[in-house]
Image: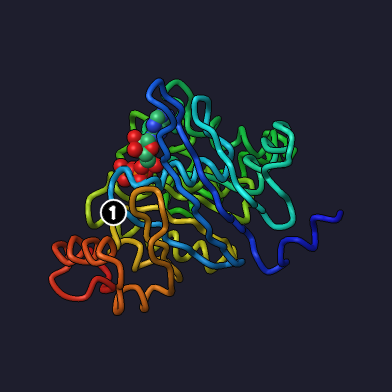
Amino acid sequence: MPEANESPRDLVLEVSHLSTVFESERGGIPAVRDVSFTIKPGQTLGLVGKSGCGKTVTGLSVLRLINPPGRITAEKIFFRSNNLAALSESEMRRVRGRGIAMIFQEPKSSLNPLMKIGSQMIEGMRVHLGLSRAAAWTRGLELLEEVGFPEPSRLMNAYPHQLSGGMRQRVLIAVALSCRPQLLIADEPTTSLDVTLQGRVLGLLHRLKEEHHLSILMISHDLGVIAQVADRVAVMHAGRTVEEGAVDEILLRAQHPATQELLVAAKDFYSDDPRAPRG
Ligand SMILES: Nc1ncnc2c1ncn2[C@@H]1O[C@H](COP(=O)(O)OP(=O)(O)OP(=O)(O)O)[C@@H](O)[C@H]1O
Ligand SMILES: [Mg+2]
């Protein structure tokens, strides 16, 4: 495998010079412009920026989930030693199933309203891990317990509409972790939740990251949220990353006006230190 040497082994994800353009009658509209970043094992990178700056499109581009008229170009999108740009669609489906899990921004659209939670929990494990129904069910119960449901068997028989937003979000986290991914892309996983639940879900992600040595690409418009979970931060503005560094560096020595604006917005929510836990 000649590619193996091209991506350093200590990186889970290496994205370099990623651009995504949506073609239209009036020409191409660039959503992501020449973005580069890396994520190490066990590391959380926060991708932060205001609405429309290209965070979701960046996450979807990594997983090649952009449909025409969208077009992705990149020098490198490496997941460990795999060049994602060079994989076939069926190989890419395996990566999406097992290697990289994504929690999508719109939680309601991510759970099938017609299927019980149990069936949705075990589906991926049966397809991607080859588990029997019984084995997948048992692991499903364990995962739901891990994300904070004391009575997981009742939940397995519930439908999504019977759950609150916070419960649905925790189910989605359990589903995302069910095939033991190495990388989790979490797109605004707490935005729809109230402040108390936000704190709980962020705490959960932090614990899961420690226990599973998971790498996370955490997407949020809220620097306060990012500051609580990320090791490093990349700030996006108008499709570009304008600033990147360790969380403390960004919080204390923000250079770019876009970052300063996000800091001010975060401070509206935290009267003092944006790193202080909320809730
Ligand atoms: N399918 C699409 N077709 C055309 N333009 C798109 C499409 N998806 C996204 N865009 C455009 O790409 C830009 C980036 O969108 P994106 O959804 O990545 O922003 P975001 O940073 O995730 O914003 P938010 O914080 O609101 O979720 C926006 O200008 C958006 O309108
Ligand atoms: Mg988005």
Pointer 1: residues within 10 angstroms few (<14), some, or many (20+)? some
Q: Secondary structure at mark 1?
A: helix
What is the residue that sits farthest to the front in this orientation? Answer: 27
Residue in the picture at 44% in, 56% down = 218
Q: Amino acid at mark 1?
A: Leu
Q: Observer-nearest residue: 123 or 209?
A: 209
> Left of 55 or right of it: where is 121?
right
Please state the horizontal and vertical placement of residue 189, each as a whole percent of the image.
38, 49
Please state the horizontal and vertical placement of residue 147, each as a whole percent of the image.
45, 53
Q: Observer-nearest residue: 269 or 71?
A: 71
Please state the horizontal and vertical placement of residue 80, each as a whole percent of the image.
70, 57
Residue in the picture at 55% in, 30% down = 119
Q: Which residue is mark 1?
A: 197
Please state the horizontal and vertical placement of residue 68, each as a whole percent of the image.
52, 25
The quarter of the image holding the N terminus is bottom right
Instruction: Count the numbered circles shown.
Output: 1
Residue in the picture at 43% in, 67% down = 244
Residue in the picture at 49% in, 56% down = 217
